[in-house]
Amino acid sequence: DQQVKQNSPSLSVQEGRISILNCDYTNSMFDYFLWYKKYPAEGPTFLISISSIKDKNEDGRFTVFLNKSAKHLSLHIVPSQPGDSAVYFCAASGGTSYGKLTFGQGTILTVHP
Amino acid sequence: GAVVSQHPSWVICKSGTSVKIECRSLDFQATTMFWYRQFPKQSLMLMATSNEGSKATYEQGVEKDKFLINHASLTLSTLTVTSAHPEDSSFYICSARELGNQETQYFGPGTRLLVL
């Protein structure tokens, strides 16, 4: 039962353009969402998070949007840089899984110079 | 801030031996730490939740006698893979949740285990 889904295994973007990474969830009890960036053979690095009481959170080049009615969130990276190339995981917590994170499968982002 | 370390980063061992992995929160106190494993090209799968001073809580399907977890202090949790077998070869990652911040987990760099 995949409660958090990232349906795009990969995304390729030109440097300077916007990268949009998407994530869907099925558990309506989730109330906190996070995005992590991960390089091979390294642990995930926290990027940005959003609580369900908000619909947008911005931090520098990173913005996360949450659409609760659609159970959908997205991460926007503007402008994209080659150093952003990595695997991006969305994660969710809340309800009976409070404190635990449920991860999506990840999306490989490649930013071309 | 919020740095988590893991040791060792790489370990190769013979089948049947036990391996201990340490997870430390370097600049904050963590009452709760989490242990994950990741298989190639797959997502992170939570193995267990480690609570300081109490027994760990294991996820369904994870053998508690095989994966021993000890959380002796607010900055250290250890995972011991007992009688390791080749199918235990994986990437093990810990995370820690800072006191007062119940939502965000900060991850260690991971430990690659190869059992021959």
Image (cartoon, rainbow, N blue to C red):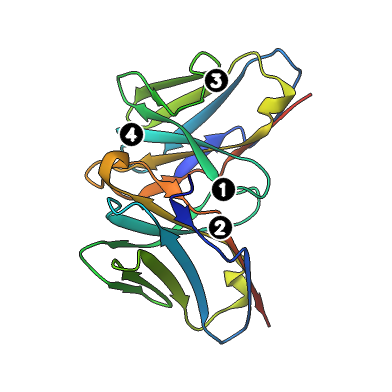
Residue at mark 4: B32
Mark 1 or 4, closer to the camera: 1
Mark 3 or 4, nearer chain start = 4
Q: How crowded is the residue under tag 3: few (<14 C-alpha within 10 Å), some, or many (20+)?
A: some
Residue at mark 2: A106
In front: B115, or A105? A105
Q: Chain of mark 4?
A: B
Q: CA distance from mark 1 to mark 4?
A: 21 Å
Residue sitting at x 38%, y 58% = A34
Mark 2 or 3, closer to the camera: 2
Q: Amino acid at mark 1?
A: Ser
Residue B48 x, y percent position in the rendering:
44, 29
Instruction: Give the quarter of the image for residue B51.
Output: top left
- Identify whether A78 is placed above or below B26: below
In front: B102, or A70? A70
Q: Point out the residue furthest to the bottom here.
A: A16
Mark 2 and mark 3 on one chain? no
Mark 4 and mark 2 on one chain? no
